[in-house]
Amino acid sequence: MSFDFLQETRTDLHAKWDDATAREKRSRTVFAQETIKVDEVAGEVEAARAAIGAGVHVEKFVVEGLKELGAHISQKGNRLHFDLSELPRALREALGIGDGDKLQARFELPVEEGVLYLNRTHPMVEALAAYVMNSALDPLAKGVARRCGAIRTRQVDRRTTLLLVRFRYHLITVREDGESPLLAEECQLLGFAGAPDKAEWLEEKEAEKLLLSDPDANVHPDQASQFVSRIIEGFEHLSPKLDQFAQERASVLLNAHRRVRSAARLRGLRHRVEPHLPPDLLGIYVYLPVI
C-alpha cells in the first residue's frame, strides 16, 4: 500500500510540475509585451490617451447628453443621481435599464455598492454614444447632436469653420507567405479661418479649443443654413487639403506602428499604410464673430 501511495504521489507531483511549466510558458507569451518600454512608445501612449478621452470628458458627454434627452440629474455628495424616466423609449431600451429608471453613478473610482462606475467602455456610455451618433446621422431623426451648425461666439474674430473628418486606412502587414490587410479608422477635427478658397488652417489645439466655445449671440436658422451652404459649395477647394491630411496621418500611423513593433522586438515583418480616399466628412460647424 505504501508503494502504491508513493507512486500516486509521484504521478500527482509530476502532473502538477508539468502544469506549472505550461502555465509559465503561457505567462511568458501573454506578457511578452513587457519588453516594451514606455519611453520608447511614449508618443503612441499619449495619442491613445488623447483619443479615448479622460474621465472628465466622459462625464461631460454623459451628463450633458442625457440632460438634453430628458433626464434629470442631481448631485448628492460624491455621486450623481440619474432619473431616466423621461428618456425616449428607444434610448431606454438601448441603455438596458428596463423598469429601473433611477440609478446612482460616479465617473471615478472607487465606488460604493449600488453605485455604477461609468467609464468610457461601460455599456451604458457606449449605448448613449451610439444613440447620439446614429440620430445625428439620420436625416429623418431630430437628434440632440447635429452634423452641421453655426453659432456666434466671442472666441473668434472672423468666420472659422471646424470639420469633423473620418480617415480610413488599410494597414498591410507583409510576411514571407503573403500580406494581411487590416482596416483602421480615426476621426480628426480640422479647422480653418476664412472662406474655403482662401482657407487658413488652424493648429490642432486651436481647433479643439473652439469645441468648448459657448454661443454669445443668436443666429437665425436661415442665416446659419447660408453659412453652412457656403462651406459645402466651396468644398472643392478643401478636398485636396483633406486628401493631404489623410496622407500625412497615414505616415504618422505607419511610423507609430513601426516604433511599437520595433520596441516589441518583432522581426521578419514589413508594413505599409494606404489611406482610403476621399475621407468622410461627418460634420461642418461654423463659428461667427459677435457683431
Image: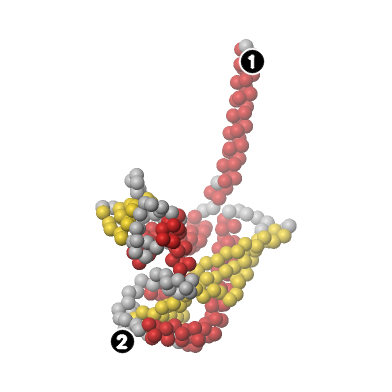
Q: Which mark is residue 79?
A: none
The amino acid sitting under disc 1 is Asp
Quadrant of the rendering where the N terminus is positioned: top right
Q: Position of residue 217 (x, y in %)?
A: 30, 81
Element under disc 2: loop
State how far apart marks 2 and 1 are (Cα): 97 Å
Let me know if residue 191 appears in the view.
no
Q: Mark 2 or mark 1: which is in front?
A: 2
Q: Residue at x 60, y 33 (%)?
A: 19
Tell me which corner region of the image, top left, top right, bottom left or bottom right, holds residue 278: bottom right
The amino acid type, in three-letter code, at marker 2 is Ile
Task: Give the residue at x 50% y 86%.
Answer: 233
N-term-proximal mark, 2 vs 1: 1
Label 2: which residue?
291
Q: Position of residue 289 (x, y in %)?
A: 34, 83
Q: Position of residue 240 (x, y in %)?
A: 56, 81
For disc 1, the marked residue is 4
Residue 218: tell me if it is visible.
Answer: yes
